[in-house]
Amino acid sequence: MSTSPPIGPLHVFAALAPEPADEVWYLASDEPYGCAALALYRCRFQIETSFRDDKSGGWDWEASPLRDPDEVDRFCLVMAVATLYTAPVVIPLHAEVLRSAARRTRRYRAAPA
């Protein structure tokens, strides 16, 4: 009979999402401090979003026919350089899209029924 390692301790936190979003995030973590858990969550979310963009989003790495490790290495280098080159342009545009969506959402919620 095998025994499983114990689960816990488990800490649950609630936090407001960063602007312009106005939703509540609920986090369950083994980290006892809410700010540290939130910082780790934000970092992980950014990494996953970036990986999704590289893999199947903007750069569409998933659709690449490349299979040779050396070619994939070069392709990753090109994606990294292109990301660094485009980020100063794309990030402010993306932020404006988020702010615009938040304004529309607030107007929709504030509209009389």
Image (cartoon, rainbow, N blue to C red):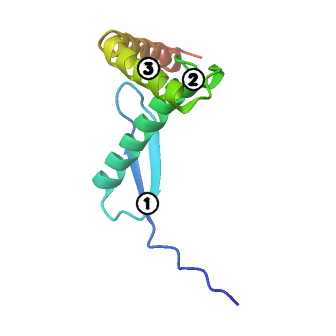
Quarter-wise, where is residue 18 in the image?
top left
Which numbered disc covers residue 61?
2
Q: Contact (CB < 8 A) between labels 3 and 1?
A: no
Return the x and y of residue 49 as percentages of the image width and height.
48, 31
Residue at (36% x, 41% y) in the render: 43
Q: Residue furthest bottom?
A: 1
Quarter-wise, where is residue 67 in the image?
top right
Q: Amino acid at mark 3?
A: Met
Q: Contact (CB < 8 A) between labels 3 and 2?
A: yes
Q: Amino acid at mark 1?
A: Ser
Of 5 and 32, the residue lying toward us: 5
Residue at (47% x, 49% y) in the render: 26
Of 72 and 6, the residue lying toward us: 72
Return the x and y of residue 111 as percentages of the image width and height.
52, 14
Return the x and y of residue 97 as percentages of the image width and height.
43, 12
Label 1 CA crowd tier, 10 Å (few <14, some 14–19, many 20+): some
**Is residue 5 depicted above or below 105 in this figure?**
below
Nearer the observer: mark 3 or 1; the answer is 3
N-terminal of the pair, mark 1 or mark 2, is 1
**Is residue 6 depicted above or below 63 in this figure?**
below
Return the x and y of residue 73 as percentages of the image width and height.
47, 28
Q: Give the SS element for disc 2.
A: helix
Q: Amino acid at mark 2?
A: Trp
N-terminal of the pair, mark 3 or mark 1, is 1
Residue denoted by label 1: 29
Q: Is residue 41 left or right of residue 112?
A: left
Label 2 CA crowd tier, 10 Å (few <14, some 14–19, many 20+): some
The quarter in which the C terminus is drawn is: top right
Residue denoted by label 3: 79
Label 3 CA crowd tier, 10 Å (few <14, some 14–19, many 20+): some
Residue at (53% x, 30% y) in the render: 52
